[in-house]
Image (spheres, grey):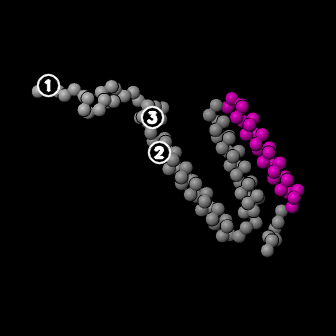
Amino acid sequence: MPHKNTMSIPWMIGIFVALMLLLLLTIVAARLPLGSATLLISLAIAAAKAILVVLYFMHVRFASRTTWLFVGAGVLWLSIMFTLTFSEYFGRSQISRTFPVWTHEVSNTQLESPATQATPPR
């Protein structure tokens, strides 16, 4: 049974045009020297594009409350995952972010097997 609030083709074309304009805005924002604001602007544009896709192309706007509940649960879970990821990342020291542990130089004695290492004098 079709939805009673179906969208027309011109409306969907308008949403598509809005998505293309947001894509162009993303490209322009990436090329401008905005410093650290580039990331925030790009994330805001990406969020706007995601909202348009979910609401209109996935037909969540005209869906039941149960669908809205599950979409909200997905957004909540995504925010929990981002919070945990970024709290772990920002909790690291600057050295471990820049130089991971596995890239530190290893001395020759650490590379030798225990059988070939010199035994200490008695």
Q: Which of the labelled discs sits on residue 88, or is there none?
A: 2
Q: Is residue 4 left or right of residue 48?
A: right
Quadrant containing the C terminus is top left
Q: Are marks 1 and 2 in contact (CB under 8 Å)?
A: no
Circle 2 Cα neighbour tier, 10 Å, few/some/many (<14 / 14–19 / ≥20): few
Name the residue at 87% across, 58% down. 9
Work out whether mark 1 precedes mark 2 in sequence or the reverse, and give the earlier one: 2
Q: Residue 77 in the image: state x and y as whole percent.
A: 56, 57
Work out whether mark 3 precedes mark 1 in sequence or the reverse, and give the earlier one: 3
Name the residue at 70% across, 52% down. 50
Name the residue at 79% across, 74% down. 1
Q: Amino acid at mark 2?
A: Glu
**Circle 3 or circle 1, nearest the eye:** 1
Please check the rendered image and state whether residue 6 is part of the magenta-colored stretch, yes or no: no
Circle 1 Cα neighbour tier, 10 Å, few/some/many (<14 / 14–19 / ≥20): few
Q: Which residues are magenta?
A: 8-34
Q: Residue 28 in the image: state x and y as whole percent.
A: 75, 35
User: What's the CA distance linking mark 1 and mark 2?
Assistant: 46 Å
Where is mark 3, residue-wise?
100
